[in-house]
Amino acid sequence: MIRQTFGATFSQRNSLMRGLAALAVALPLLAACSGDDEPAPYVEQPVEDLYNTAADTLAVGDDYELAAQQFEEVERQHPYSVWASKAQLMSAYSYYLANKYDDATGALDRFVALHPGSPEVPYALYLKGLSYYEQISDVHRDQKMTKDALDALGEVVRRFPDSEYARDARLKIDLANDHLAGKEMTIGRYYLSKKNYLAALNRFQTVIRDYQTTTHVPEALHRLVEINLVLGLQGEAQATGAVLGYNFPGSDWYLDSYALLTGEDLRPEAQEGSWIGSVWNGIF
């Protein structure tokens, strides 16, 4: 009998390991070495033995890459077995645990291409998103992995909104967007420190336009007030201050913006035709 190892919540590694450890002892592997100094001869083995050996290796947890290779052997020797597709996913998951993310995403893409109607496709897409998500670097570096994670996790939400993986995918999408917004803020602050006001303005506007639900929005609005005042765009500064005050009235960023505006004998107020009014959904 083959022990079923698929179906747990795979993002919870510890729970999966405990579940695997509790399973019955695997059936013995039939292959044997021919001698201490000679490689073992190739012997086609029953699918039960191959799958259970891979499951045991995964459960032990000290060589995930070996487990992945053992699951691959299931498919190689028994490609038409009902367990071949399950072994594909388990191999991908094992590569994920081994931090071999390219191997994991490659295996997952192959699974989805070969089994587009499988009920495990939502999980495969979710695990692909996690593989990218865990490679997200700090905001000072290239954000390609962040964008790849957003694409993969977004596909889970779009195609399988009611799946058990969609909720966590949405959470990680929010966090990834916050990360991308943080990248824009870092660049904008740099340009601002160099008094390159137009370049800084563009970065902060990107945060407001594309990442309105992130934690960086209050500061981005304040920076726009600051830059618009420097550039002599008083109406834009007032309109932006009004949006900031309406949406984040108790924030330190609003207090700073209010001080800047009143220092110029201005007040936060809506301005017809302002840029902020054309992109912000909160007040105008």
Image (cartoon, helix red, strand yellow):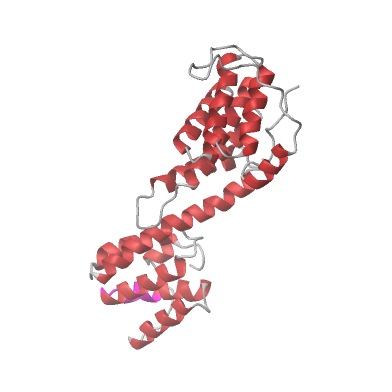
Q: Position of residue 243 (x, y in %)?
A: 46, 71
Q: Position of residue 184 (x, y in %)?
A: 37, 59
Q: How many marks?
A: 0
- Residue drawn at (30%, 72%), measured in percent from left and top? 227
Helix, strand or loop for the magenta stretch, by majority: helix
**Magenta stretch contains residue 111:** no
Relative horizontal placement of residue 279, taking residue 49 as reference (left or right):
left
Q: Position of residue 223 (x, y in %)?
A: 36, 71
| Along the line of sight, the residue nearer the viewer: 120 or 214 | 120
Q: Is residue 195 positioned above or below 26 on the image?
A: below
| Along the line of sight, the residue nearer the viewer: 171 or 52 | 52
Name the quarter where the N terminus is drawn: top right
- Residue drawn at (36%, 70%), measured in percent from left and top? 224
| Along the line of sight, the residue nearer the viewer: 39 or 154 | 39
> On the image, which quarter does residue 112 sit in?
top right
Q: Is residue 30 positioned above or below 155 on the image?
A: above
Q: Is residue 64 positioned above or below 260 on the image?
A: above
- Residue drawn at (65%, 47%), measured in percent from left and top? 14
- Residue drawn at (48%, 42%), measured in percent from left and top? 151
Q: Is residue 29 positioned above or below 175 on the image?
A: above
> On the image, which quarter does residue 115 sit in?
top right
Does the image show residue 273?
yes
| Along the line of sight, the residue nearer the viewer: 188 or 278 | 188
- For the record, the magenta segment spans 231-238
> On the image, which quarter does residue 20 sit in?
top right
Q: Position of residue 145 (x, y in %)?
A: 42, 45
Does the image show residue 155?
no
